[in-house]
Amino acid sequence: MQKLREWQHAMRASLIARDPAVNESLAAGIAPDRLDVYRNTILSGLTRALRLAYPAVERLVGAEFFDGAADIFIRTHLPRTAYLDQYGDAFPEFLQGFAPAAALPYLADVARLEWAVNGALHAADETPLELAQLAAVGVEDQARISFQARASLQLLRTHYPADAIWHAVLNRDDETLAALDLGTGPVFLLIERGADGITVNRSSEPEWLFLSALCAGELLESALEAAPDIDAPAALAAHLAAGRFVAFTVSAPATEQTREIAA
Amino acid sequence: MPLATTSTASLIPARAGIGLRFQHHQAVLDTNPDVAWMEVHTENYMGGGSPLRYLDAIRRDLPVSLHGVALSLGSAEGLDAAHLERIKKVAERIEPGLMSEHIAWSVVDGSYLADLLPLPMTEEALDTVCRHVDQVQSYLKRSILVENPSTYVTFRHSTIPEWEFMAAVARRTGCGILCDANNIYVSCQNHGWDASAYLAGLPPSTIGEVHLAGHAVRQLADGKTLRIDDHGSQVIAEVWTLYQQALTLFGPVPTLIEWDNNIPPLETLVAEARRADHLIALTAKEAAHAKAA
């Protein structure tokens, strides 16, 4: 008798790569083409998941091209989780190296933006940090605060103006799309989920770098030091007011620790 | 057997409910349709944002059943603990009246093959499924229902009739059975089994819910006909007849109208639910009559 685990591996090889080995396990009179029903369901279900996450990419390349690219992507990048809202994170990189899409150099950037939008859309609900909690931190400890950003906040830097392309494509605004200057340099984006849905906003590079440092969990002190050209305290206040953080920690002062060890 | 920890208000009544899909979220809130309960796919509510807000709002008025489509009870490599935890989180939030999963598998080598794949009906597969149902029930601290599959192939090494497999899972784990009448019809037509015998092989006391849906018919290259469970059309007459047989055997049970493709206006689902409700009421009346006589 064939062991279940080996048999399931053989089924996978059949369903994804048409390896014929599993056909021997089919009962007499069962034509192997019946397995196409499962192949179709898997492929169409995963393609639908990608289509939901990447609607602008689909409009840019057309449905037929999208299906073809999805087919190749799916066979080489099966989901690692059964929670399909998280499926497709590798699609932007795949598109970046996908030769048939080379005529659209900005396609991967638009895909990166759509993946950030997808992440903001499906992130778990969280309660924003309340200013009162922060007010309890003593002045002497404030430099050693680090924040945890909400999961529905995504930061993205793209080489092409992905946000402008994305807006124009989803609004079917061909005029704006045709007039877009692709060579304006990188854009720095904040993607977040509010009460009314997803917003995508541009930020300046220094403001974006400051928020990136905070979101990466850097100490407030070092994030401030790395942002000499902006009004960082005002920026921090705005982020807090917008509910972009959900928690904070105060690290122990490194110098005192050193002193203790020395003593 | 683990006991359900649901409050009375969340219990699913022995009436007809409908499968709630995103397309109908707003319509349900706006029109407050006359159905007794709703069922959703657990996987559609694992993130935050608007889907959960809709479900919270609908849950305030109606009992909700959580129907998982991806836990993969039949995977030889074991359950994905992260997925089970996600299911538990949704259950804690929604407090469902029923929770169900499928007799199928989808995960191998950590990859999710996005379909309910058929299991060989072997002792090893039965042991695997029972082990996983035990694990799920003790993790969720409640009993679940397991749904019979619709299948397009059968296997040389299968040794257990599917209805006996279902009954054995229920007997060994204390779980209930979600009897999908359309799946029974589809599989019996595809494999030449007797649908009435299949129904008769399921222990009535284990039946916690019935599913009704439509299916497609496709001609194969070898001239045979294959019925495909696509939930994309109305319940056909033969499945309604099978459903009446099921009600006679099982008594009044919660019954779900399910659509997942070509999803029609909400009213179409409500009308099918009304038809099921009518049959449930007839069964209840006959049972009362038989008792009195």
Image (tube, rainbow, N blue to C red):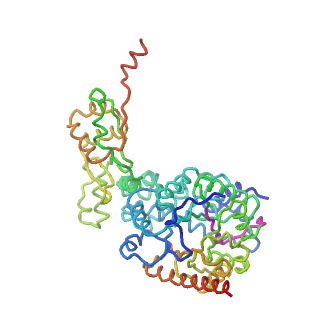
Q: Is residue B27 magenta?
A: no
**What residue appears at the point 20 percent right and 37 percent down from the top-left corner?**
A231
**What residue appears at the point 62 percent right and 77 percent down from the top-left corner?**
B181
Q: Position of residue B292 (x, y in %)?
A: 66, 86
Q: Position of residue A99 (x, y in %)?
A: 44, 55
Q: Position of residue A83 (x, y in %)?
A: 51, 57
**What residue appears at the point 41 percent right and 53 percent down from the top-left corner?**
A123
Q: Nearer the viewer, residue B51 or A52?
A: B51
The number of numbered discs placed on residues in the rendered structure image is 0
In the rendered image, which quarter is residue B136 located in? bottom right
Q: Is residue B147 magenta?
A: yes
In the rendered image, which quarter is residue B26 located in? bottom left
Furthest-top residue in this view? A263
Q: Quadrant of the C terminus of chain A?
A: top left
Q: Quadrant of the N terminus of chain A?
A: bottom right
| Main SS category, magenta section | loop
Extent of the magenta region: B144-159
Q: Position of residue A17 (x, y in %)?
A: 61, 60
Q: Nearer the viewer, residue B189 or B222?
A: B189
Furthest-front residue in this view? B292
Position of residue A248 in the picture relative to residue A201 (left or right): right
Q: Nearer the viewer, residue A191 or A197?
A: A197
Q: Nearer the viewer, residue B79 or B118?
A: B79
